[in-house]
Image (cartoon, grey):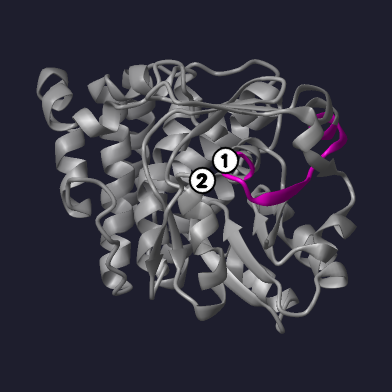
Amino acid sequence: MAKICVYGAGSIGCYVGGRLLAGGSEVSFIGRARMADQLRSQGITLSRHDDSRWYVPPERTDVSTDAATAAAADLVLVTVKSAATPTAAAELASVLRPGAVVVSFQNGVGNADVLRAALPHHTVLEGMVPFNVVERGPGAFHQGSAGKLEIRQAPALQPFVDAFRKAGLPLTQHADMLPVQWAKLLLNLNNAINALSNQPLKAELSQRAYRICLAMAQKEALALLKRADIRPVKVTPLPTTWIPRVLSVPDAVFERLGRTMLTIDPLARSSMSDDLAAGRTTEIDWINGEVVRLAQRLGRTAPVNERLCELVREAERSDVRPSWSGEALLAQIRAAAGASSARHP
């Protein structure tokens, strides 16, 4: 049986790794001491928005704080926050056995490149987790929205495909992951808006002013992607370019047209919102910041996403958690877009 190691025992890592473990795979986890202690004492309790449940008892949970745990792995799933990718790359480079396959199940579009640079003799693949996972208590992780795992196709991946299928997490394989990653990132542009709203995702997305903020961020990104000749794939029932228009319709209409976007656990929040609540540095630079960097590479500007970056960074530094209303946040976004238009007519 193939040995799988999850490097990054956070919400995503524990959920995906826990599902693989519940499906019969041999899985180990590498994480911080707090999580290691919880998993050793509580095991892993998993749930999904459709009321599915799984449980892995403590005696079946192999968790360590030492990266050397990955030395025996055939497949390593990297699920740390993007800022920790260089550290993960360096630690894995020192312990991985020849032939081990590494998958980046992380936000952003460049983490696999960081891993690949440090692991030139290993197969490193881009992956994407489309659904939201929240930590509901010690060792308890809940999938709050729908979606299937996406991954770059490679011959070295094929021995592990059946393990994901048995876990109920089938892999959708792609020859080119960049359009998939950007499609996910376009949806993740809402993470900042959700974090600033300090509301559950479903409640936030049910309010038109917040949705218009997201629509403006997406339109800005889509214009840049078109200029860069990157065509995001369709990851929702609606084509990617239609989503900003649907987001902008009145609430009653959106409730019908955007039903799949509202198929979310009522309590679920974005990971960025959870990070602000916990006083952790967010991944804003690897989500909205990616749009800003793309604009810079093209000699353009991205004022909407740049302003969202600024507001989240201000929230990170603040002792008081902000709770922006939709109207107030939209005023900030429109002011930033208007100021940019005045500077660059």
29 inside magenta stretch: yes
Label 1 neighbourhood size at 10 Å, few (<14), some (14-19), many (20+)?
A: many
Q: Earlier in the sequence, mark 1 or mark 2?
A: 1
Residue visible at 71% across and 26% down?
279
Mark 2 falls on what kind of element?
Answer: loop
Tell me the kind of residue under disc 1.
Arg
Q: Which disc number belongs to residue 197?
A: none
In the picture of the structure, the residue carrying the numbered disc 2 is 167
Residue visible at 89% across and 59% down?
68
Residue 101 visible at all:
yes
Which image quadrant: the N terminus?
Answer: bottom right
Which image quadrant: the C terminus?
Answer: bottom left
Q: Position of residue 325 (x, y in %)?
A: 39, 16
Mark 1 falls on what kind of element?
Answer: helix
For residue 253, above or below residue 215: above
Magenta segment range? Answer: 21-36
When asked about the image quadrant of residue 280, the answer is: top right
Q: Position of residue 228 (x, y in %)?
A: 33, 73
In the picture of the structure, the residue carrying the numbered disc 1 is 19
